[in-house]
Image (tube, rainbow, N blue to C red):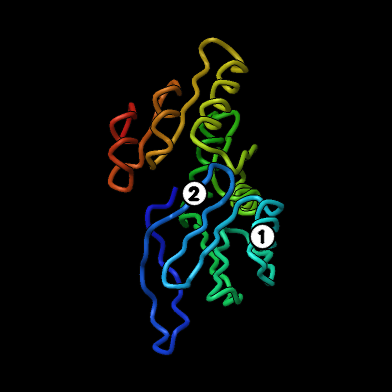
Amino acid sequence: PFRRAAVLNTGSNGTAHEHSGNQHSRNQGILQISQNIRTLPYQDFRLFRRLMEKEGVQWESCDLPGTIVHVTVEGRYAGHILISDLPKPEAKTLVEGLKAAGVKKTVMLTGDTEAAAKAVAQELGIDEVHSQLLPADKVERVEGLLARKSSPSASLAFVGDGINDAPVLTRADVGIAMGALGSDAAIEAADVV
């Protein structure tokens, strides 16, 4: 769960501030309340719609890939913030290089939304993508990939950078952490940093 989130303060000074105090339910989004400002990130559109209806908020949709944080102030819709990661410029070349070196299949396992994950996978030439995954879901997917390896000598490598990737990094044949960008848990769990 998010520990802290920056939210838009629509008060007269127009500045942004940070707050904490989340109410979080697994697979149900996050509802944060502080000084009459509410933010509601969502991953599942149907769930989001139910939560917004429960809050009685009229909202505007956003079809861009990424995590969308809808903001209400005193029960009125104030707008949304789109949060998305952009692939590094060299990422596509790296994926092409892996395939040229004999990597048979590239798979993305991510907690990001389906739309964001598919957009990145298509841009980079990744063969298979699984989105909206929790850490346990990633482990389950890796277990499935390990069971379907083409031969006993084939290896499954997993590259990760976050604390949520640590369980998968330990389960893969080769776990690779993103060095200085990685969390301590990912670095400790990996075979290669």
Query: Residue 11: where, in percent of width, then height?
Result: 44, 84
Residue 13 position by quadrant: bottom left
Left or right of residue 33, residue 63 in this image = right
Q: Is label 2 in contact with label 1 (beta carbons under 8 Å)?
A: no
Residue marked by disc 1: 54
Query: Of helix, strand and loop, which one carries label 2?
Result: strand
Residue 176 position by quadrant: top left
Residue marked by disc 2: 24
Which of the pair 15/155 is nearer the observer?
A: 15
Q: Is residue 23 above or below residue 40?
A: above
Name the residue type under label 2.
Answer: His
Residue situated furthest top in the rendering: 152
Query: Of helix, strand and loop, which one carries label 1?
Result: helix
Left or right of residue 47, residue 81 in this image = left
Which of the pair 73/119 is nearer the observer?
A: 73
Query: In front: mark 2 or mark 1?
Result: 1
Q: CA distance from mark 2 to mark 1?
A: 16 Å
Residue situated furthest bottom in the rendering: 12
Name the residue type under label 1.
Answer: Lys
For the point 58% across and 12% down, the residue is: 151
